[in-house]
Amino acid sequence: MSDAAAAPKHHKATSNEKLVIGASSLGTVFEWYDFYLYGSLATYIAAHFFSGVNETTAFIFALAAFAAGFFVRPFGALVFGRIGDIVGRKNTFLVTMAIMGLSTFVVGLLPGYNEIGVAAPIILILMRLLQGLALGGEYGGAATYVAEHAPNEKRGLYTSWIQTTATLGLFLSLLVIMATRLMLSPDDFAEWGWRIPFLLSILLLAVSLWIRMQLNESPVFQRMKEEGATSKAPLAEAFGRWPNARLVILALFGAVAGQAVVWYTGQFYALFFLERTLKVDGFTANTLIAIALVIGTPFFVVFGWLSDKIGRKPIIMTGCALAALTYFPLFTMLTEAANPALAAAQRAAPVVVYADPGDCSFQFDPVGRNRFDSQSCDVARAFLSRASVSYTNASLPEGSVAAVHVGDTIIGAPDVASFSGQARSDAIGAFQNELRAALDAVGYPTAAAPDAIDTPLVVAILALLVIYVTMVYGPIAAMLVELFPSRIRYTSMSLPYHIGNGWFGGFLPTTAFAIVAATGNIYNGLWYPVLIAAATLFIGLFFLPETSKRDIDQ
């Protein structure tokens, strides 16, 4: 019998080990705080760093830069996962924390597009890439570290505290943003105050590094090191051997992909939808999300604990199923509750864009220079997209000039090809004024009226979305740790987690808003998380093993 096999089957955590686990979780909160500041302030970052392009494209570019941090997370998982399996858990996530904190601080100091031109978005994206690399190495280390301290029968409960850190980091970022907003005028916050939360991160970095430095190495890794049982080539072992590579693939498509889109829909897309689409002012939207997070966050621990009793898989699959079945009605209800005037106008006076399909461009320009004003259909749809007005498309014969139907009112778009210079600008401006007047006449609001928001209902919907998040996310760390052997655990679990959350989840806001801009329907972006959650449900139910009773000391 090997020494690993002879290890105790039910390691009982001491009070000191629980303190160590708590300190590890607290350090992880800081990294998520850093990472999510960007998402919460995407509108302001778009204005300062992407001001050289049109408004719709600038916002999608800002979200794309947000997603850039997610794109490199799997590469961070490979780099730091390998180091973590060879050198150790503790020292690896000390390095990732330092990279994360310094990158965030630099964003707070970085001049905007108007000051240094194209260098501004380039440096910004570089900082996002460094953050993504660092976060790619953080989660696997923290989750593995906590799991390897936990008793077998309480692993779901213990690791669920790590799962709360992402939400607590988001919550902390929202609190700091709201406090800064309260201290400054809206103009000052938009001009320079949004930088303050980034700059404050240097203080949190110092505190968090001190906390992490008090930790000891994981007992499982320490024992492997003493026995000479650590892996010399964790990448080759994790992905070059089919039995383990198969588990990596199953973990990605049968659990993490669905978990990721549910996570980002419930906590980020919901915030963007409130602020960008429903025109709820930023402070109110952040406050509503923060309240929902306070209500929902304890359920991470509840579902982590429950997964120790009934298994990880039933809870994760139920969360995916609920999300796929209820997202469309829930977001429709959210519109009714947060901006009832918009919902009423959409029912009473639906908007239809009649145009030659060949006259309509895809409303996202990857080059960033298209103003969508060279064709009549583009002029009409670009204005409606900026105004967050949901519309449907109807075809006209080839060569026809577009027209917008607002209820019974018809507003013809200008035949911009027949104008040039100032005359074209004047024609577009006149059309936009006429269309805005028609929208106003039937009740389409330019912003959500604060006194009309049904706050209890909005909070209830947002809290339910967060509870879906806790169902899929609370047990996921324990499941991933249990799927893989200890000698290659850091590497093996990090890659599927960060492909799922970095790519499937991180690209969700960008993809969803591009779908909305292209189709005109404010709800069509939800097809992305719904379809992925449904696919994960199917794969997970039929192919993913249950792991809750496994011994991870081997």
Image: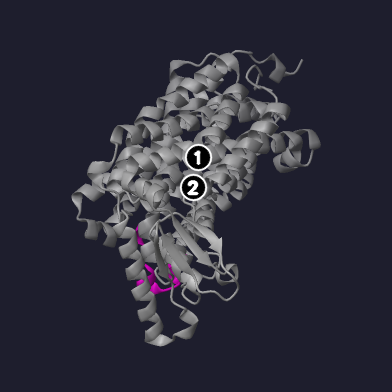
Instruction: Bin the neighbour count of mark 2 within 10 Å (Cα to Cα): few under 14, some 14-19, many 20 and up.
Output: many
> Disc 1 on helix, strand or loop?
helix
Depth check: give the residue in front, 350 or 93.
350
In three-dimensional space, the C-alpha distance between marks 2 and 1, rounded to whole angstroms, equals 7 Å
Image check: 86 left or right of 335? right
Residue 104 x, y percent position in the rendering = 41, 53
Residue 63 in magenta? no
Residue 167 x, y percent position in the rendering = 42, 36
Q: Is residue 370 above or below residue 505?
A: below
Q: Residue at x 62, y 50 (%)?
A: 75
Residue named by callout 1: 328
> Disc 2 on helix, strand or loop?
loop
The quarter of the displayed image where residue 185 is located: bottom left
Q: What is the image's colouring?
A: one colour
Marked residue nearer the N-terminal end (2 or 1): 1
Depth check: give the residue in front, 530 or 82.
530
Which region of the structure is painted magenta? 108-121
Q: Residue at x 52, y 17 (%)?
A: 306
Q: Main secondary structure of the magenta part?
A: helix
Residue named by callout 2: 523
Q: Is residue 305 above or below residue 348?
A: above
The quarter of the displayed image where residue 269 is located: top left
Disc 1 residue type?
Answer: Phe
